[in-house]
Image: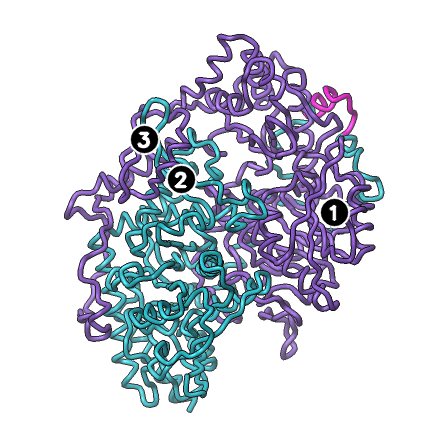
Amino acid sequence: MENKIVGGGVASSSPLVGKSSEPTIFELSVAGRTAYSLRSTEVPKRDLSESVPQDFVRDTPIDLPEVSERDLVAHFTRLSSRQYSVDLGAYPLGSCTMKYNPKFADAVANMAGIADVHPLTPARQVQGWLELMVLLERYICEITGMSEATLQPAAGAAGELTGLLIMGAHHRACGNKRSKVIIPDSSHGTNPASVTLSGYEAVTVPSNDRGLVDLEHLKKVLDDEVAGMMLTNPNTLGLFEEEIYEIAQAVHEVGGLMYYDGANLNAIMGISRPGDMGFDIVHSNLHKTFATPHGGGGPGAGPVAVTAALAPYLPGPKPALVSADGANVYRWTIPERSIGKVHGFFGNAVVLARALAYMLYNGSDGLKKVSQHAVLNANWLRHKISESFEIPYPQLCMHEFVASAHGLRREGGVRALDIAKALLDEGFHSPTVYFPLVVEEALMMEPTETESYQTLAVLAERLNELAGFAKTSEGQAKLHAAPINTPTRRLDEALAARKPRLNFDQPSNH
Amino acid sequence: MPSFVPHSDFETKEMLRDLQMESLEELFQLVDPKLRLKEQLRLPKGVSEFEVLDKFLNIGQRNLTGGKALTTFAGGGAYDHEIPSVLKALGGRSEFVTAYTPYQPEVAQGVLQALFEFQTLISRISGLEISNASIYDGASSLVEAINLSCAATSRSSILISEGVNERYIQTVETFSKGTGLALQRLRLNDKLETDFVNYEGDSEIAALVVGYPNYFGAVENLISARDLADKLGALLVVVYDPISMAVLKNPGELGADVAVAEGQPFGIPLSFGGPYLGLFSTKKEFVRLVPGRLVGETKDTDGKTAYVTTLRTREQDIRRERATSNVCTNQTLMAVWATIYLSWLGKAGFIETAKRCHDNTRYLVEKMSAIDGVTLCNQSYVREVSFQLPIAVDLVIDKMAEQGYLAGVKGTVRHSSGITTECLILTATEKRTQDEMDGFVETLEKVVRSGK
């Protein structure tokens, strides 16, 4: 099959418009130029000082850019040509699940009744929105094996903090909030940061030589001060925690709760459920698993689902179907012991609508197929590059895996970073590098299920070539110099931090 | 079965064969069999995109009244502004929509430069030098502002005006349970302005939090607020309405240490409450305590100007449990939208829009004040006002909704005199036409008269 491979998923990374810097919008500004328009009106103009004390009336206008609409379009179109994206090519960024974002979900997001509704509309006039939310909660609960959910958290990290506050409320109700939350050393940085914000101390447990939680070590740190444990399963090394059931049992035995970080849910849909593994609280990253676009770094959505025992603590208001006057209607309700609101309104609602659309399209059969092929792609890619890169943990991986450039570095000084940058020249986005922290020179790759055999074959071929370059001095020089085809070359990150220029009104640093 | 998985059956088999496997099930052999699902998830089977779209058309219809969204006079943190076509076209470009956090800046200059421009715009609007690349929404920006204040002062009590959006206060309360903060509230006077002068209480305050204009529309006296903050040695945190900044002195000019806002009015659709845009600005001296991402200028190896996320040692993926915040994914796309919107409005359009909001609101005030028993509560305002009604506010909102209007938001005011009253908070953006406002007031008058 391999000799038939053509192209597949490789982006041309040379921008069409050349390689000059794009001026900022402020530099394009010309006094007196405008793009805006306003409706005509007969409403009388009034003087602001009649309703605002003079001390607070602005006298000098805010200096917003003055550009024509044509200039505006050109500027942002040129910026977009300096930006890699999923729509352009493969994006094997580990832990981020950069899968294809279906276009019909864009159509859903822009529909009348979805995009244009004020959040404080009375429930009777937004029965569709409440139904949508209840339906999404049911889907999330079924996929994760939980009982009830909240859709308010706006991102995964917000979900983590919400879950930990629920954990705290549960323990407080039992008489003792407890003081510690356990996290493995391979966890996402958001986990310990969320633990601190929830008023707990993060206790890190090491991984064993198979990259999994060391159950014996874990048992040694478990006591009645442990409020719970946060785990990603599969973990950030892409490995399934084979002893998860025993881990959960041990944590439950000391009265702790199990928190599931859903960053890697894409590996197990329809295969296994966090609830069946023994987890009590689960967040899902809808922008990862359920294909809502990442938006250059958000918006995401991080709903939290919990067991029936924890449902009374969920944030409110929460939509529910209730019967009133002989009919079923959707209303806002506040769970009995709610921890309170965690979002100004009801969460990233339109992101929720997109995720539900994706779930309906795939259905039970399609979601399972998604996870199966995500895992197939990751294992196949790993297999194809395993002779060029070290694979620190040799067992089967799930939807992602971690390779290491440690050997290349030792041999010829080529680092994971060099491989990542050189891959950009080859028309691919690079993998996640230097994470998780437990692997030296880590290259974390998550191809996702939407990349084809052909794309992965070319990706593997290019990775193997780059590893080959790392062995010759000429090749090493090429790798150190990469990228050369990208809109900009390697950046001076130290300069950015040493002399910060965080907006156009501060002096340039070079 | 519909799917975005590209593999043909033949390709799947070939890939499995390379892995020396016969079936997809074998990929999951390390998952304990007792944890493996024995049957399919209890969900409907997949359907075509057309059936999905039908379903959502149906859902959407049930959010409309007479085939359209309610004509909106409600604000309360979400405003019905015009959204220009050029914004939808540029903001919908898939290079912005389907990228992720700019971890590889060489191929992410589009998002990074847009964020650098965004930070600049928000700093000019808030009057504070450092603005980050966004937080989830107005409420979460306030939570982060409070966390910054506590870190900067090593204190853990917050003094918050009841003129701040009540949903934000509730959100702060939720998160303060984790960080162990104490919240004290400052009540409002009859003009719905905060009473700063008579505060006598705890002096160990980390932050004084004030709305500007506040939730009820009143233009708070930030000069008095600054005086009180100075007396307490506290930071002054201002929650501002971004559109009003076109015509008001901004928080930075009036001495705020941190300024936060809900950025939704900057071109973001109402979207039933999200995704919105948390704006966050502060003084330069607090830059190491700023939550979330910051984009800075630098140069590449050829000396060419470029942008990169910077001062990263504040962030969770590096500093872990000692990070300034747990924020990772933020609202980048919404920040790009706001940048395009503000560039489209420009210097003149920003002022014209704010003035039009003011003129329309003023027009409503005059017409509504003529209704028997309807009285304006706040004397100062830019674009949002509170009215006392002769009948229950909830009833008015429900009746008006049946007539196709979103009449406003119910506000509950606990006055410094001790009494509690309710009011209808409303606004008329530049999008509202004179006909719409006339129709609204006419209908409101009937509703009020019939309800008395």
Q: Amino acid at mark 3?
A: Thr
* Residue ID for mark 1: A273
Query: Which hue is chain A drawn in?
Result: purple
Q: Residue reaching furthest right?
A: B34
* Residue ID for mark 2: B93
- Spatial CA distance of label 1 from label 3 is 48 Å
The reply to whether label 2 and label 3 mark residues of one chain is yes
**Circle 1: element type:** loop
Let me know if residue A112 appears in the view: no
Residue A281 as seen in the image, left or right of residue B89: right
Give yes or no for residue B289 being in the magenta stretch: no
- Spatial CA distance of label 1 from label 2 is 36 Å
Q: Residue reaching furthest left?
A: A32
Mark 1 and mark 2 in contact? Answer it, CB < 8 Å. no
Residue A79 in the image, given as x and y percentages of width and height: 34, 35
Query: Where's the N terminus of chain B, which quadrant?
Result: top right
Mark 1 surroundings: few (<14), some (14-19) or many (≥20) residues within 10 A:
many
Q: Nearer the viewer, mark 2 or mark 3?
A: 3
- Spatial CA distance of label 2 from label 3 is 24 Å
Relative to residue B432, is residue A28 depicted above or below? above
Mark 3 surroundings: few (<14), some (14-19) or many (≥20) residues within 10 A:
some
Query: Where's the C terminus of chain B, which quadrant?
Result: bottom left
The magenta segment: B11-23
Disc ID at residue B305 = 3
